[in-house]
């Protein structure tokens, strides 16, 4: 089923009334939105992985002697 209406910035447009440039730009807008969504999902996966690794590292280091890190004063 082909899309007949598109919504952009609160306004609805009939695809049949759009010129070729507008149609291409609408396609690029949709594709860029999808790419952003995929990138956000990849970031969420990476953050979850980092949290698991951090937890595991904390367990591994719990019995290793350490010193308080020096902090830089302004």
Image (cartoon, rainbow, N blue to C red):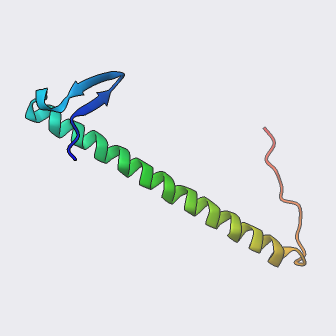
1 relative position to 46: left or right: left
Give coordinates of residue 68: x percent, y percent: 88, 61
Q: Residue at x 80, y 70 (%)?
A: 58
Residue 55 versus residue 20 in the image, above or below: below
Residue under the point 76% across and 73% down: 57
In-image side of 54 versus 1 (left or right): right
Q: How many marks?
A: 0
User: Could you say which quadrant of the image residue 21 lies in?
Assistant: top left
Question: Is 16 or 31 nearer to us in this picture?
Answer: 16
Q: Nearer the viewer, residue 32 or 18?
A: 18
From this view, report whether residue 9 is shown above or below residue 25: above
On-image quarter of the C terminus: top right
Give the vertical position of 34 relative to 64 (above or below). above
Report whether 6 appears left or right of 17.
right
> Residue at point 23% right, 25% down?
13
The percent coordinates of residue 7 (x first, y second) are 31, 29
């Amino acid at each position: 089923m082909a899309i007949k209406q598109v919504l952009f910035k609160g306004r609805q447009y009939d695809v049949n009334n759009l010129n070729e440039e507008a149609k291409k730009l609408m396609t690029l807008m949709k594709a860029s939105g999808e790419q952003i969504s995929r990138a956000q999902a990849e970031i969420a996966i990476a953050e979850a992985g980092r949290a698991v690794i951090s937890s595991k590292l904390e367990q591994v280091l719990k019995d290793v002697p350490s010193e308080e890190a020096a902090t830089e004063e302004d």
